[in-house]
Amino acid sequence: MTSTPERRVLQAGLAALALAALSLPAAGTPGTDSLAAARAALDKRDGISAEVDLRRALDAGVARDEVAAMMGEAKRLQGDTDAADKWLEPGQFARGQREYGFHMLGRLKLAEGDYDAADKAFERALAFSRGDAETWVDIGRLRYRTGEQDQAIEASLTALKRDPKNPRALEFRGQLVRDSQGFAASLPFFARGLQASPDDLQLLGAYAATLGELGRAKDMLRVTRQMIKLDPHNSRAFFLQAVLAARAGDDNLARRLLWKVGNAFDDVPASLLLNGILELRAGNNALAVQDLAELARMQPGNRRAQELFARALHANGDDREVIARFAGPARRDDASPYLMTLVGRAYEALGDRAAAAPFLDRAAQPRDTRIALLATSEQDELTLFRYGDDPFRLDAAVPRVRDQLAAGDIQGALAVSARLGERYAGSADYQTLAGDVALAAGDLGGALDHYRAVAKIRRSLLLVERMVTALQQLGRDEEADALARNFLAEHPQSRDAAELVGNLAARRGDWRRARVIYSWLLGTNPGARDPQSHLMLALAEIRTGAPQEALANAGAAYRMQRANGRAAWLLGQLLAQAGGHDGEARALLAKAEAMGAGSDSLFALR
């Protein structure tokens, strides 16, 4: 959590108050007892109490080098990194405290983002022993942040070998498994950690969040209530409850819970997303723009974040801004129908129907599976400028290669990708980029190899879509379908994953599965307002013997998107079959024929 000046002032005030209240002489308490109490407080992540006990130890005559490591950690937990530096950076630790002291120094430097210093400190810690579980957890976190994800995985396994019941080791391993295999696969690691440490708030928070992503709302609520019982002011518990309330549609409750959270999560993407959605629902469009603009800046590759930002701008009447920011992305082959529709509506709002028509027409076409090669963002441009002296630094090279791919310079992209592989073979970002380059070059097998390497580290929906594309081009449709269904099973709340599975099921003629998927999608927010989901459900219903339901959904799709030729064609066909609507049916079919719709084999009803 970021330590702002206001938080540091508040924490300092609390610390002073605690010291004044608790630092009364404890007659007959030896320094060693105070050290033990400080250790227990640090185990609970209570930096203030730990500092109180450590100052008692100093007053009792314990040497400074005996308390330096623990005091540095106590100060770090309070957010006072300057004071933590003063205790840890000299490296003056008692003989039995050296491994721990350099571990705490590495942890501090990791928190500060000084990765080179953190690496050196961890090396010094390991010089005294093989390292305990928590040392290897912190080394793993360092490796992950510096793009060495393969080494991070190895570090997590080493941590569990050192102590299979260590809460931090189980938490870290669970987080990595969640990234690579999904929510259901990660849950047992958090559960095992709680068996060993049932009151560990970090583990409880991870467990609750994972339960929520799996749709187990009652279990999630039970765990968050346990967190609040242990810590009545636990911000994470209240935030998770706010997410739960928002998903249930109780926005007033969500807002009341967020009030209890305060500003603890102001700079966290999930909080920006939740606030933005709540403001949009309440009609506070200007406030929604503020939150979603920041989210879109922080996560340029997050498709939903970009779409929500565009929606907020349009709702706020900022249609010129919608066009300036999103007309380019909406023209790309991989643009979503939702983004194309928003850009089209923005042009319409400005009175330019001619410019709106191509976007709205494309939005009405059937969706297909495409890879999304991310465009270069403003942040990427800044990185390219800043690290222009090292063109093969990964964070600068990735946007450069994506620009090459967008320009059709496949050979240039291949050359840069090969150079990057010499330095960053263990990086998920590199492997994703290398897969994209191979796919663009027609090397489908090579692309899959790179994508599978990424999946061992971080299996996102964007990655699964890439793998599905490669498998389909290789003619391995059943494998593509199984991959998508497996991802959905691990991420059952993901609308995008469900839509991918539904699309693949329809293309393969598995209409029963498609009907289940699209029925679920229409029951989610904003699924009921999605014309394509209504249209696909109508197709599935007519093929599974439910003509009345199909007619209702085809009608809903057409009313929502009258420029959708396939919706017009399907509704016309269904009305003709139902009888009694001959004139309306003929008009709809004529309109569809004029739009060139109805020829797609997916829509053939005979």
Image: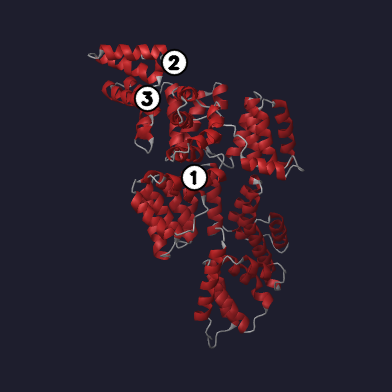
Q: Amino acid at mark 1?
A: Leu
Q: Earlier in the sequence, mark 1 or mark 2?
A: 1
**Cα gap from disc 3 to disc 2, whole angstroms:** 14 Å
Say the numbered circle drawn on residue 292: 1
Say the numbered circle drawn on residue 535: 3
* Residue occupying the point 67% across, 38% down: 398
Left or right of residue 484, residue 65 in this image: right
**Cα gap from disc 1 to disc 3, whole angstroms:** 30 Å
Q: Give coordinates of residue 516: x percent, y percent.
A: 36, 30
Q: Give coordinates of residue 603: x percent, y percent.
A: 40, 17
Q: Is residue 407 visible?
A: yes
Q: Earlier in the sequence, mark 1 or mark 3?
A: 1
Residue holding disc 2: 600
Q: How many marks?
A: 3
Q: Give coordinates of residue 233: x percent, y percent.
A: 43, 64
Under circle 1, the secondary element is helix
Q: Earlier in the sequence, mark 3 or mark 2?
A: 3
